[in-house]
């Protein structure tokens, strides 16, 4: 065994799971919504996130991702230098994305969920500023000073994740921040190898090859 093989991360167990993500924005301009989706992971590392008319297949060994559009029956193949499977807790269409580096990590212990032992972690992230609002007529100076005094600093974001210890897949995640709340719950989980066809492009689909990004375009 060479050194590169000895340092490889252990393969994650194959699994199929059904999720539902509840998105509750704080703006009040958009109603809460529910997004059902599924996650598949094969023993060779391939993953599939399937939501509605869209699907995303990632292949870490083939160094590519495949975006499936079931409405147009198109498959866009995207070469990627470092492909990692979409994280189940983010849902099919993540609405809230905490920064990469947490400022605090809290161990929440272990419990049983859907017949599986899960381990909980709570991550605290720096606050994220809300998106800019449409420009309005300028305020008088006194009103601007008063608004600045009343404005509260945005709260930090928190991400709570409960991960199945044996299957290594999050079964529950909750993200809370200035943009709202997003909760993802696993409704059904089935250990074992998913069908190989789930990770392949259907024969009737048109294949679109997207060229790899050049170094200048990534900078």
Image (tube, helix red, strand yellow):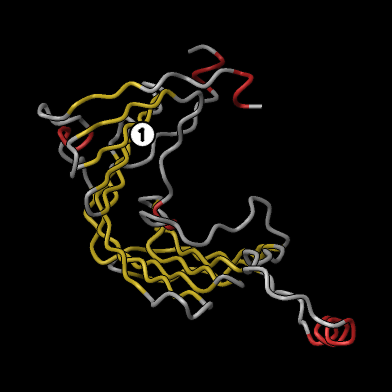
Residue 36 lies in what quarter of the image?
A: bottom left
Disc 1 residue crowd, few under 14, some 14–19, many 20+, Cα 10 Å: many
- Residue at horizontal 23%, vertical 24%? 207
Residue of label 1: 58
Residue 196 lies in what quarter of the image?
A: top left
- Which x, y percent locates residue 37? 27, 57
- Which x, y percent locates residue 164? 39, 58
Of residues 178 and 72, the one nearer the viewer is: 72
Of residues 192 and 65, the one nearer the viewer is: 65
**Would residue 102 be found to the left or right of residue 161 on screen?**
right
Q: Quadrant of the C terminus?
A: top right
Residue 179 drawn above or below residue 79: below
**Would residue 52 be found to the left or right of residue 181 on screen?**
left
The residue furthest left is 204
- Residue at horizontal 40%, vertical 28%? 60
Residue 105 lies in what quarter of the image?
A: bottom right
- Residue at horizontal 55%, vertical 57%? 97
- Residue at horizontal 39%, vertical 66%? 184
- Which x, y percent locates residue 90? 44, 56
**Would residue 73 be found to the left or right of residue 47 on screen?**
left
SS state under label 1: strand
């Amino acid at each position: 065994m060479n050194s590169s093989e000895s340092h490889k991360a252990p393969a994650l167990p194959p699994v199929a799971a059904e999720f539902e993500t509840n998105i509750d924005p704080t703006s009040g301009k958009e109603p809460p919504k529910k997004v059902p989706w599924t996650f598949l992971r094969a023993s060779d590392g391939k993953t599939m996130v399937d939501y509605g008319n869209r699907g995303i297949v990632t292949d870490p060994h083939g160094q590519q991702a495949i975006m499936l559009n079931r409405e147009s029956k198109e498959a866009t193949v995207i070469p990627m230098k470092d492909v990692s499977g979409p994280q189940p807790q983010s849902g099919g269409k993540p609405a809230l994305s905490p920064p990469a580096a947490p400022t605090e990590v809290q161990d929440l212990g272990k419990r049983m969920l859907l017949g599986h032992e899960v381990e909980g972690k709570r991550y605290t992230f720096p606050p994220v500023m809300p998106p800019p609002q449409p420009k309005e007529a300028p305020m008088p100076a006194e009103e601007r000073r008063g608004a600045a005094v009343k404005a509260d600093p945005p709260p930090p974001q928190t991400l709570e994740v409960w991960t199945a210890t044996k299957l290594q897949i999050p079964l529950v995640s909750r993200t809370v921040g200035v943009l709202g709340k997003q909760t993802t719950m696993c409704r059904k989980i089935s250990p074992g190898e998913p069908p190989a066809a789930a990770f392949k492009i259907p024969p009737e689909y048109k294949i679109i090859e997207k060229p790899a990004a050049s170094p200048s375009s990534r900078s």
